[in-house]
Amino acid sequence: MTARHEAHWLARCFGALPDALTAGFFVVLWVAPQLLWPQALRTGLLMMLVEFILVHAAGMLGGMVMARQGEPGQRWKPILGFGAMYLVFIAAWSWQFQAWWPFLALGWLLAGKLSLVLQPLPDADKRHRLQSDWAIGVMAYLAGVFLTTFLPLPRLGLTRTAVAAADLPGDGGHWLSHPQSVVAFGAFYFGVLALVKVFDWRLRTGDLPPGPASRP
């Protein structure tokens, strides 16, 4: 492996780190939740709700960042306006969960989405990678929803006692009545995103849907 290839490999691993850590969190939450804090299940549920917003926004925000010229700091300015809009949703969930950490979850997940912008790649390569990652992310999210809704999933470490300790908000709903489904969903979804980034898996340009990230 040449020095250049090694640098690109390390950059991809660094870019995949947030998603890999998040997938690991969901695996531990499913298998051994006693190793985490008592309300970790609430955290996992909220992260997947926040991700529902970000999976729609990532392609648009990334395309706006890539379209800006100049210093890297200037490229992040378009995020501020749209970020304020998404904060309205996060504020509502923060009120429902009676906690401030939904904002921390938003920042963590957003960092995983836009870490590609900081990688040392040509803009055209970044644009293609960003659009491909967004398309694969949408497919992985939809596949995760389908699989974890219809497949029988074991509770593993998510006993009734562990679920009760999480004090989940609201009543009813598949995720609340079958919490192992949202945890398995998180492990699958973020695991796919991490593997895509580490191994640089991409869709061909002709297979990509049109979107903001594809604009020069």
Image (cartoon, rainbow, N blue to C red):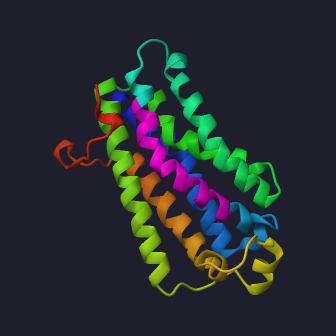
Q: Is residue 48 left or right of residue 117?
A: right
Decide if residue 133 is in sight here: yes
Q: What main secondary structure does the magenta stretch of the protein show?
A: helix
Quadrant of the image occupied by residue 35: bottom right
The foreground one among 80 and 120 is: 80
Which residue lies most toward the left here? 206
Q: Is residue 111 above or below residue 42?
A: above
Q: Is residue 42 left or right of residue 14?
A: right
Q: Is residue 62 left or right of residue 168?
A: left
Residue 52 place in picture, x, y as percent = 53, 56
Residue span colored magenta: 44-63
Quadrant of the image occupied by residue 158: bottom right
Q: Is residue 61 left or right of residue 80?
A: left
Residue 50 place in picture, x, y as percent = 60, 53
Decide if residue 122 is in sight here: no
Is 146 within the magenta?
no
Quarter of the N terminus within the rendering: top left
